[in-house]
Amino acid sequence: MTKKALLRRGVFLFLGAALMSVGLEIFLVPNKIIDGGITGISIILSYITNIQVGLFLTLLNLPFLYLGYKMIGKTFALSTLFAILIMSTGTILLHPVPPLTIDPLLAAVFGGIILGIGVGIVIRFGGSLDGTEIVAILTSKKIPFSVGEIVMFFNLFILGSAGFVYSWDRAMYSLIAYFIAYKMIDVTIEGFDESKSVWIISDQFREIGEAVLDRLGRGVTYLEGEGGFSGENKKVIFCVITRLEEAKLKSIVDELDSTAFLAVGNIHDVKGGRFKKSDIH
């Protein structure tokens, strides 16, 4: 990794971890609202023992650094360690700062948004702030449940615990915060400018490809295909567009071949190639 790439990763890991500490200490923790995973356990233990949450965030996540190193690699483990230390330090420094709101609904909403953005940035740049998924990956090999199902069960148990430790209304606010954070993590990782992959099968492939080039400004690739039923050779057009261009592309295909096969899928990241849009007139 070049020094520039390393610096960029470090800056965004710092930003993501700092945002998570803000979401915790300025919104969730003072209002007795928890998140899922190791973070939720840390908040509950902090409330019971009256020890700052940052200490538990560090101690409980340390065992998962070794697992992450074994399963994913050294870069992931070091990125995770850096992010966890920044997050824990941030919660300690922000602990004396009064919360921005004592309204539990506002705290759940804005705390979930900020926390989710922070976690999403850290994941996007190669780190992690919670060892729950690592445990789920290991556990899924021994029991007949998927990683997603194990994470869901684990988090439901933790969020339900808030009802016994705090009160049931706080458990419900915690569920709101967790749902918002979960969605914001997806948005942050995938980005707002979501791209679309397009596959088109048509006998008029040349005309459609040229129209996409001229009228949409997007490059296309012609792939070789074979019909499963007919056994005939087919040309498959592949291209990547933004979601704002989807309607126009469909109209182009419908105009040139209304019987063409068209499949559109979501893409979370695009790099390299000739994805840059050409000028159109």
Image (cartoon, rainbow, N blue to C red):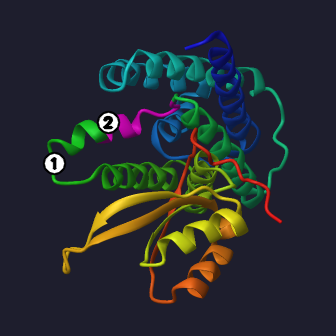
Q: Residue at x 53, y 26 (%)?
A: 57
Magenta residues span: 128-136
Of helix, strand and loop, which one carries label 2? helix
Q: Amino acid at mark 2?
A: Val
Task: Inspect the image, locate mark 1, and give the three-letter code of the amino acid beneath it.
Answer: Ile
Residue on which disc 1 sits: 143
Expressed as whole percent of the image width and height from the top left, the position of residue 200 reads 46, 71
Asked whether 135 falls inside the magenta stretch, the response is: yes
Q: Quadrant of residue 21?
A: top right
Query: Which residue position holds label 2?
Result: 135
Q: Residue furthest top?
A: 3
Please tell me whether residue 67 belongs to the stretch shown in magenta: no
Q: Position of residue 162 (x, y in %)?
A: 51, 51
Mark 1, Cα crowd under 10 Å, few <14 / some 14-19 / many 20+, is: few
Rounded to the nearest angstrom, the CA distance separating label 1 from label 2 is: 12 Å
Specify the label residue 225 is tagged with: none
Given residues 247 and 148, the one toward you in this image is 247
